[in-house]
Image (tube, grey):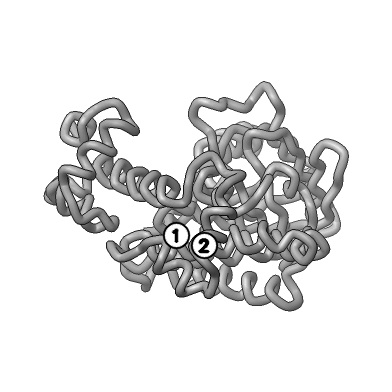
Amino acid sequence: MSDFVSTDKVSVRHRLSYWNDLVCHAFPRVEVTSLLDGPFFGSISTEQVAFIKVAEVATGPSIVRRSKALIDPESEDYVKVIYQLQGETIVYREDRTAFLRRSDWVFLDCMQTYTLEHTPASFNNVVLVLQLPRQIFCARLPNPETLTGYTINGNVGLGRVTYDFVRSLRRDVAQIEPQTRGQLAETLVDLLATNLRDSLCPARATAHNQTVRLLEVKSFIHRHLADPDLSVFMIAKALNISKSYLYLLFQGENATIDRYIWDLRLEKCRADLANPLNGHRTITDIAFAWGFNNSAHFSRLFKERYGVSARAYRH
């Protein structure tokens, strides 16, 4: 169910401070300064698509700052994708600047500082903000911190496909069943990550085939995580590569490919155990839904990873 808030019913003198509160409630903390001579205005319409918060933000000319003092590494480990739907926005990120016009987008890490300037070129600026956990998005990209703050063209090729998918999802999400939203969210993240990589690293994508292959493998794992048959053999066969090459791809990672799969499954189970809406499901049901087929194996791995039993964690 979507949530809509705006400054319309607030007195003119209190609108900007009210807007700052609204924005900080919806996203990691920022400071907003108006560039208007007249009364400020703004509105936010939000919808949750599985682990992705989708928000359409309309505002007058203004500056949005995410300064170092506002960053809380303990509770705000998110990344953002910002699509320009109307007007123009300039994004300042350390030593680089991105210019966004209709359908362009930019990737931002909320653990880094940035400034958005919704320019006076259009009285009404509208952006679509996708906010998702940093770990989920960055698992699909090598060195994601180097890819922030660049303009990505949403008018051609894969950029256009991704843009159309984002707009369709925003428009029709209310009619989509909750159990389907998770699959769509995973697909969207795959599209965004691939679009980002191919737009910014075309030469490296060709020169470093291992990086491209690693991304394909990780994307395959995310899409088939709930399949109990997911294995090195299954991945190698589906992607037409050898098992030894798969192990080679993960040599530079923090975990082997097998550990990578189990860690992702454990994180999905942990999230489901923490969700009160899953109170009617048994721990075994949740574990088996994410690809485990042995409750004792799951219990041992869960305790090794989180330091407590799954039952104790749920309580």
Q: How many marks?
A: 2
Name the residue beneath numbered marker 1. Answer: 222
Mark yes or no: residue 8 visible.
no
Residue sitting at x 57%, y 68%: 166
Pointer 2 and pointer 1: residues touching (CB < 8 Å)? Answer: yes
> Residue 90, which numbered label?
none
Say whether residue 105 is left or right of residue 297: right
Q: Nearer the viewer, residue 315 or 169?
A: 315
Q: Residues within 10 Å of mark 1 (few under 14, many from 20)?
A: many
Coordinates of residue 167 in the picture (x, y in percent): 57, 71
Q: Nearer the viewer, residue 89 or 79?
A: 79
Q: Residues within 10 Å of mark 2 (few under 14, many from 20)?
A: many
Q: Of helix, strand and loop, which one carries label 1?
A: helix
Coordinates of residue 15 in the picture (x, y in percent): 62, 38
Residue 61, compared with residue 152, is above or below; it is: above
Q: Of helix, strand and loop, which one carries label 2?
A: helix
Residue sitting at x 53%, y 33%: 76
Residue sitting at x 62%, y 52%: 141
Residue sitting at x 73%, y 65%: 198
Residue 91, compared with residue 13, is above or below; it is: below
Name the residue beneath numbered marker 2. Answer: 219
**Residue type at the position of mark 2:** Ser
Mark 2–mark 1 distance (CA, rounded to whole Å): 5 Å
Coordinates of residue 255 in the picture (x, y in percent): 49, 42
Q: Quadrant of the N terminus?
A: bottom left
Q: Nearer the viewer, residue 110 or 35?
A: 110
